Amino acid sequence: MVETRSLVAMLPRPVRTLPADLATVFVLVGLTNIAVLGPIIRDTPLRVPLGLAFVLFVPGYAFIAALFPESGEAATADTTSPTDEDVTAGESDNRGLVPGSSVFADRSGIDGIERVALSFGLSIAITPLLGLALNFTPWGIRLVPIMLTVSAFTVGAAVVAAVRRWELPEDERFRVPYRAWYAAGRAELLEPDTRADAALNVLLVASVLLAVGSVGYAVMVPPQGEQFSAVYILTEDDDGELTADNYPTEFTRGEPREIVVGIDNHEHRTVDYTVVLVEQRVSVEGNETTVEEQRELDRFETRLAHNESWHQPHDLEPTMTGDDIRLVWLLYPDGDVPAEPSMETTEYYAHLWVDVSDE
């Protein structure tokens, strides 16, 4: 115990005398930056609750702490009011009130409920304004600039709040009544007046834990949603932009045309993909299409993480001649390519009808 106190005494005085609520602000800023920017931790659900607190509460609380360093109590109405004998008609007394109006006790600070409410409101206003300011800078609205800007604002406001509190007499400084809350909660939960109160306390604690656990699970482990992959074909326009239009449909055998095949991964995991490009001569009778001949033209492989996309330009050169030759890009997740790839062996494919003439 003595050794712990000696270590604390070695810290600089501003750190030792830093108010607990402002120290919590600094800790939250540091933890949020680590959770969002850290190489390994940023992939964990820990960034969600820390990020919500960092954006929706902490900046506003630090700003309010800087504006109102003094303690405050809720306003109470004074039932006495000036009489007509004390104040002439149409004039106000020395407190700026007219006869019949309410008189409120002088107050220089705000109470805890007002402080919390204003913290949420100002955080919701401050964060977009900082983003708007970043939009006009070379860094733009990106993750790292947003984190650094909000962190700098919050830390600066907390430093101003600490300095302003230190300048006040000790009995006038704002303090979060942790000990009073702990004593009141302990007396209410552990020293109930009756057994009925004890049972209600147990039920209340269980309900709060269940609610917090449910909300925490929903935030930290959000539903994955639909899992799927996608394959598609694109072409380049005159500006070099990829577009799903103007596909080549007229080919001369021996003269390739460039086309781009694309893959999107929405499987919520990393997947190894294989694309098999085949050409087919088909016959159509009514609603039934029969493949009479098939040849494999090309094959591509790639590995994509969740929400990643991949575009691969390649030369498209059919070898079959005739009208209505079908070119099919067959996508196989996890590399499970059958011996005879076809549209019946995968649910992901893209196709293009072309006419191919001889040289």
Image (cartoon, rainbow, N blue to C red):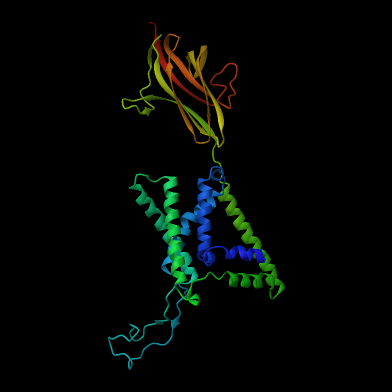
Task: For residue 66, say whether it is visible.
Answer: yes
Above or below — where is 13 with respect to 102? Answer: above
Above or below — where is 210 with respect to 233? Answer: below
| In front of the other: 83 or 108 | 108
Task: For residue 73, say whether it is visible.
Answer: no
Above or below — where is 199 with respect to 44? Answer: below
| In front of the other: 30 or 86 | 30
Residue found at the far top of this picture: 359
Rendered-image quadrant of the N terminus: bottom right
Residue in view at x 53 percent, y 49 percent: 34
| In front of the other: 40 or 227 | 40
Residue found at the far right of this picture: 195
Residue 22 appears at what percent x and percent y?
A: 50, 63
Residue 96 appears at what percent x and percent y?
A: 33, 82
**Left or right position of 54 against 356:** right
Above or below — where is 90 with respect to 58? Answer: below
Residue found at the far bottom of this picture: 85
Residue 105 appears at what percent x and percent y?
A: 43, 81
**Left or right position of 313 against 301:** left
Residue in view at x 49 percent, y 71 percent: 174
Rendered-image quadrant of the C terminus: top left
Residue 103, quarter of picture: bottom left
Residue 168 appears at what percent x and percent y?
A: 45, 74
Residue 352, quarter of picture: top left
Label tally: 0
